[in-house]
Amino acid sequence: MTTVHGPASGTVPSCLLPNQPLPDSTSIRLLCFHHAGGAASSFAPWQAGLGPDVTVIPVQLPGRERRVREPRFRDFGRLLDELDEQLDPLLDQHHAVYGHSLGGLIAHELTRRRVTTGRRPPEVLMVGACAPPHLPRTAVAPRTASDSELGAWMEELGGAPTHASGHPQWFLRCVDRLRDDLGLAHSHPRRPVVPLPVPIRVLAAEHDPLLLPAQAREWARHTTGGFEVHTVPGGHFFHREFPEATLRVISRLLQVAAAGRSGAAERSWISDV
């Protein structure tokens, strides 16, 4: 493996973790986009879980962890401009993308941009706990929610860090980050549905109040490259509650994608519980 460098500066792009390894041309790169209020560390266990044939590349949005001093994006278009520029050099070989919740919108929009500009798309687009972009985001906390309401919403979903509840100032910082990220989600442009020639695989949890089964199936409208929904145990943050079950599904999907057996015309509902 080698270490990734920026396209011009020779340094690691700011959206990647330090010393991010890249695979040789025979391995597949898996770019991972985190949820609102979250951080790239949520994918820390994935490399060990997926093994050496996959190189996990967590993508870090600004305003958290090592990018904590950088201003957070509140405009979806500006975020995509930065990610597109920084990630483009990594996407000239076999790659797949996974996005969780807000990260699913980011992953889809980045894929859409690459398709419409004639660049190499991912071999598979995987989204978890994320409603398709053409549906109203009525389940997302409203922009007018108070800090206490937003914090309660976050705790109810299981998204509050376990060490934050006993530290009010830290908890408020978490709420502030979540508020900005949800604003980013609300700024996502509403466009007519244009199906992409990329297989889409949706991971939907049994008890996720933000993604109902009927909503998950609506992702089928966004692809001509094959579509599946995989049900997994847990709630909105199933990837943290049940990491082994989540990685079993993703590992199988990457194996199928790498073998070119995704099935261009399939339409199915598959349970992985």
Image (cartoon, grey):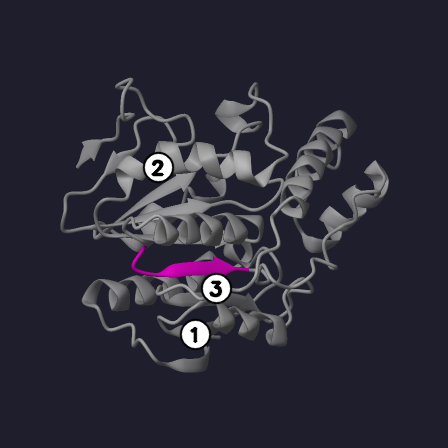
Q: Which is more N-terminal, label 1 or label 2?
A: 2
Residue 87: mark in rendering: 2
Q: Which residues are magenta?
A: 122-128
* Residue 270 is a magenta residue: no
Q: Residue at x 45, y 79 (%)?
A: 270
Residue where numbered disc 3 is placed:
194
Q: Could you tell me which secondary element the residue under label 1 belongs to?
A: strand
Q: CA distance from mark 3 to mark 1?
A: 18 Å
Question: In the displayed structure, does residue 36 sit left or right of residue 50?
Answer: right
Q: Residue at x 68, y 43 (%)?
A: 182
111 shown above or below 82: below
Q: Which is more N-terminal, label 1 or label 3?
A: 3
Q: Could you tell me which secondary element the residue under label 2 belongs to?
A: helix
Q: CA distance from mark 3 to mark 2?
A: 23 Å
Residue where numbered disc 1 is placed:
228
Amino acid type of the residue tagged 2 in the rendering: Leu
Q: Residue at x 76, y 25 (%)?
A: 169
Q: Could you tell me which secondary element the residue under label 3 belongs to?
A: loop
Q: CA distance from mark 2 to mark 1?
A: 26 Å
Q: Are marks 2 and 1 in contact (CB under 8 Å)?
A: no
Amino acid type of the residue tagged 1 in the rendering: Glu
Q: Residues within 10 Å of mark 3 (few under 14, many from 20)?
A: few
Q: Give residue 224's quadrant in the image.
A: bottom left
The answer, for residue 247, to whether it is visible in the render is no
Amino acid type of the residue tagged 3 in the rendering: Val
Q: Nearer the viewer, mark 2 or mark 1?
A: 2
In the depicted view, which residue is nearer to us: 73 or 207?
Answer: 73
